[in-house]
Amino acid sequence: MAKIAVATGPAGRAMAQPLDAALLDGLQDHLGLERQASAAYWAMSLWFAERELRGFAAHLMRESRGEQQHAGLLADYLIARGQTVDLGDLPAPGQQWADAEALLSDAFRLEADVTTSLQLLYAMAERAGDVRTTVFLDPLIQGQIEAENGAAHLLGRVRFGRLEAASMLLIDGELAAGQPPAAPLA
């Protein structure tokens, strides 16, 4: 009986469909972006904790953990596809902001950058005819749209309150109670 050859990835793991080289590079880069976002959110959490705004700090720490989870999902996906995960060096996150609005503006831009990266990956996967990757990315993109909305809402509330102590403490209390930054209307 003839032995049928099975394709393997760089680590020797069996794989059903090889990944397009550019798409693989994009997935590795996005994994790094998720790790950078996690570190950035942790730095933001620390900034609020240092200013006794524990609700904001807790919310941003949850965001940090969420970004780390996204990096883990990407790592799991790469391994499932027979690839080796590359954990390159990460730059240190910024830790200085003029005020909460500047910090939350950075958080919103971070979410927008992650959304753009996922959309580019999706387009690359479509061009490569890699349905496995588009299916994997669908829920990530949906979650990212929700994260972007939450970041925009929180930034808008802080702007609306004009950084007044009472409004900041009210928002901080809501976040400490675990209320989501943006409640759906539907």
Image (tube, rainbow, N blue to C red):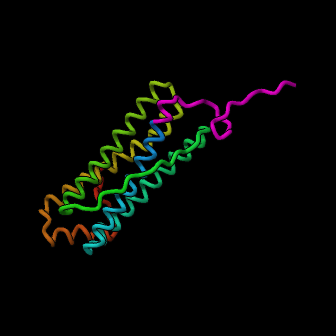
Q: Position of residue 29 (x, y in %)?
A: 44, 41
Tell how many labels: 0
Dividing the picture into quadrants, the one containing residue 46 is: bottom left
- Would residue 93 be found to the left or right of residue 75 on screen? left
As displayed, is residue 161 above or below residue 150? below
Dividing the picture into quadrants, the one containing residue 180 is: bottom left
Dividing the picture into quadrants, the one containing residue 14 is: top right
* Residue 8 falls within the magenta-colored stretch: yes
As displayed, is residue 95 above or below residue 169? above
- Would residue 81 be found to the left or right of residue 117 on screen? right
* Residue 125 falls within the magenta-colored stretch: no
Foreground pick, 122 / 184: 122
- Would residue 152 be found to the left or right of residue 72 on screen? left
In which quadrant will I find the N terminus?
top right
Q: Residue at x 33, y 62 (%)?
A: 43
**What segment carries the magenta color?**
1-25
**Which secondary structure type mostly characterizes the magenta part of the structure?**
loop
Q: Position of residue 55 (x, y in %)?
A: 30, 70
Q: Which residue is drawn at 56% across and 47% down?
A: 76
Foreground pick, 11 / 149: 11
Q: Residue at x 29, y 56 (%)?
A: 183
Q: Which residue is drawn at 12% across and 62% down?
A: 162
Q: Where is residue 65 in the image (x, y as percent from the top left)?
A: 43, 59
Q: Position of residue 127 (x, y in %)?
A: 45, 24
The furthest residue to the right: 1
